[in-house]
Image: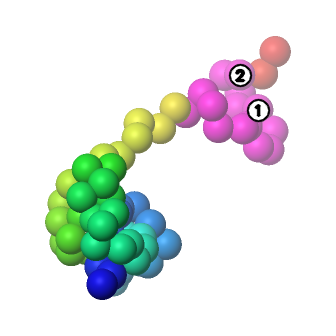
Amino acid sequence: MTTMVYKSPGNMVRKDGTSFGWKIVDDADLAAALAGGWFSTPAEAISNMVSEPVDDEAKPKRGRPRKTEAV
């Protein structure tokens, strides 16, 4: 048999702005998927979501520079 597992964030966006992704795995691979960060329900995936910190310096700058950045 097969089982659907979930991970957040993902491409399925809910009304509250949270998101999750899913995939179907064989029952033989279920333990490995759960150990690899996948969850049995979307709610579990969202509540255990690990957000990566955003590095503002890594974002490309667009537009003209701010007055404080002008040389």
In this rendering, the answer to whether 10 lies above or below 48 is below
Q: Is residue 19 visible?
A: no
**Which residues lie in the magenta part?**
56-69
Label 2: how many residues lie within 10 Å, few (<14), some (14-19) or many (20+)?
Answer: few
Residue at 28%, 73% in the rendered image: 27
> Where is residue 47 shown, x and y percent of the image?
18, 60
Residue at 66%, 22% in the rendered image: 68
Q: Are marks 2 and 1 in contact (CB under 8 Å)?
A: yes
Q: Residue under circle 1?
A: 65
Residue at 72%, 38% in the rendered image: 60
Residue at 76%, 32% in the rendered image: 65
Q: Which mark is residue 56?
A: none
Q: Quadrant of the N terminus?
A: bottom left
> Where is residue 49 shown, x and y percent of the image?
28, 54
Q: Residue under circle 2?
A: 69
Q: Main secondary structure of the magenta part?
A: loop
In this view of the protein, which residue sits in the foreground, 20 or 57?
20
> Where is residue 14 shown, x and y percent of the image?
35, 80
Q: Quadrant of the C terminus?
A: top right
In this view of the protein, which residue sits in the foreground, 14 or 48?
48
Q: Amino acid at mark 1?
A: Pro
Q: Amino acid at mark 2?
A: Glu
